[in-house]
């Protein structure tokens, strides 16, 4: 049990707390589900890009899936080996591509023909061949929230099967492109196995048809997206997930890559905030806390549910909205949750905050971002200090006119 009271006294609030032991267990559970084949778990850095979090996965042998050159730099800095780094994303810029090529990462994931041509040109200019994969959009409904669905033709990600084929042929015919991988990622927070199974079958068939024309894919990258429990969802077990991917691969000599983000970190993380005030009107009970949408955006952005628990606190529970100090009606961390009477400075713990939490944060309303703390067993340590007002103005203050 994590002693949130002690952590809040030591590091103040609002505070992000990550259980590094839990991250390790999740990593190992998924890794062992793929044990029938060579596999690479490339942690999706965007889920939680704190250097110490990435380092935790580096120490377990993990790779990194990055969606900007900044994330690639973070991964390298945290000790991920270059040959375990993948660079994805629909809009890579020239200098990002060039840097990725010189860093000798595992491959760049091309998301359009135009981008592949750009990669080719840049590699040619550098006189350094580039390993690539193509992100295939299998046009499958992942049955998740529309904002986090990525594998439909209506989404901006990847290319259709025929375009993918043309891209592989283009790559094969260039001495500056080495097509080594194939990739799909149909969405996030997937709780239904069927779309993954279907997508894996479609993409594995494409691998077979590429083989016929002498294009040998070595890495079969099934993306991320494995769902987690926020509320009472039924989720997919790592074993079933792995089996769905592995069974599509019969007869193929490929290394399986997957890119879990949320699965590794979401339920390792807690957002700790303290009660400032209570306010009751004819309709509602509001708990006003010191954390806000600029710290944890998911409730405001997606209407995401996060479980809330109290540290101490007894008495009859009643329905309340947990809201922050930010000047937006959309600033809430939880709606209609049953909470006991709460005192000034009492702690609330927002659960499942380890993925897409801190990273989506901002300084809106000139609010310094929270500190981040790691916990493992009975030790805890700071992994990002709390921002100060000075941090927030440092890029502006020298430009004031005298
Ligand atoms: C976001 C993303 C992931 C990780 O998604 P999770 O749902 O956090 O597992 C993996 N791969 C790609 C390409 C992504 O964009």
Image (cartoon, rainbow, N blue to C red):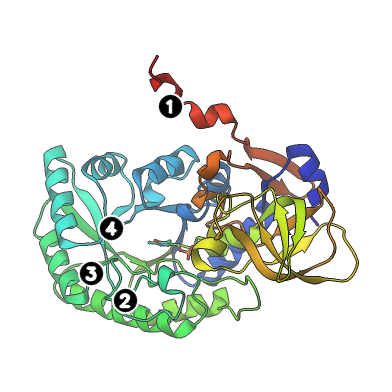
In contact (CB < 8 Å): disc 2 and disc 4: no
Asked whether residue 176 appears in the rendered view, the answer is no
In the displayed structure image, the side of residue 325 where residue 132 appears, left or right: left
Asked whether residue 348 appears in the rendered view, the answer is yes
**Residue 390 position in % (x across, y down):** 55, 26
**CA neighbours of label 4 inside 10 A, class few (<14), some (14 to 19), many (20+):** some
Q: Earlier in the sequence, mark 3 or mark 1?
A: 3
**Residue 199 position in % (x across, y down):** 35, 79
Which label lies toward us, 1 or 4?
1
Q: Earlier in the sequence, mark 1 or mark 2?
A: 2
Q: Quadrant of the C terminus?
A: top left
Which residue is under mark 4?
A: 90
Could you tell me how far apart the alpha carbons at marks 1 and 2 are, in whole angstroms?
42 Å
Q: Looking at mark 2, is its residue's CB closer than 8 Å to ligand 1?
A: no
State the mark number for residue 152: 2
State the mark number for residue 159: 3
Residue occupying image coordinates x 56% and y 73%: 238
Which label lies toward us, 1 or 2?
1
């Amino acid at each position: 049990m994590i002693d949130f009271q002690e952590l809040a006294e030591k590091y103040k609030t609002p505070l992000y707390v990550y259980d590094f032991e839990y991250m390790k267990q999740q990593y190992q559970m998924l890794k062992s589900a793929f044990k029938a084949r060579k596999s690479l778990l490339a942690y999706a850095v965007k889920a939680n890009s704190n250097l110490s979090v990435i380092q935790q996965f580096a120490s377990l042998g993990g790779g990194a899936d990055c969606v900007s050159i900044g994330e690639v730099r973070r991964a390298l800095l945290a000790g991920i080996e270059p040959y375990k780094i993948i660079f994805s994303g629909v809009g890579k810029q020239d200098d990002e591509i060039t840097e990725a090529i010189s860093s000798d990462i595992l491959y760049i994931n091309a998301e359009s023909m135009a981008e592949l041509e750009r990669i080719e040109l840049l590699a040619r200019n550098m006189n350094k061949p580039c390993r690539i994969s193509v992100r295939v959009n299998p046009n499958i409904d992942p049955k998740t929230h529309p904002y986090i669905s990525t594998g439909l033709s209506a989404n901006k990600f990847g290319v259709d099967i025929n375009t993918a084929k043309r891209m592989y042929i283009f790559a094969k015919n260039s001495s500056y492109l080495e097509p080594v991988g194939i990739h799909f990622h149909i969405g996030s927070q997937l709780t239904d196995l069927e779309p993954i199974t279907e997508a894996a079958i479609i993409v594995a068939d494409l691998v077979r048809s590429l083989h016929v024309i002498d294009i040998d894919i070595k890495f079969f990258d099934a993306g991320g997206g494995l769902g987690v429990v926020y509320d009472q969802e039924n989720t997919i077990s790592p074993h079933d997930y792995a089996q769905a991917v592995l069974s599509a691969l019969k007869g193929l000599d490929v290394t399986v890559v997957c890119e879990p983000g949320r699965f590794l970190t979401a339920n390792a993380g807690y957002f700790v905030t303290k009660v400032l005030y209570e306010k009751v009107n004819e309709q509602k009970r509001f708990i006003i806390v010191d954390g806000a949408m600029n710290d944890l955006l998911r409730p405001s952005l997606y209407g995401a549910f996060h479980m809330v628990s109290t540290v101490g606190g007894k008495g009859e529970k009643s329905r309340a909205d947990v809201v922050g100090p930010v000047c937006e009606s959309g600033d809430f961390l939880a709606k209609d949750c049953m909470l006991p009477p709460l005192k000034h400075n009492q702690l609330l713990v927002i659960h499942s905050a380890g993925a897409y939490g801190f990273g989506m944060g901002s300084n809106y309303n000139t609010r310094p971002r929270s500190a981040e703390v790691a916990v493992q067993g009975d030790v805890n340590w700071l992994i990002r200090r709390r921002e100060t007002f000075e941090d927030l103005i440092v890029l502006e203050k020298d430009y004031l006119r005298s």
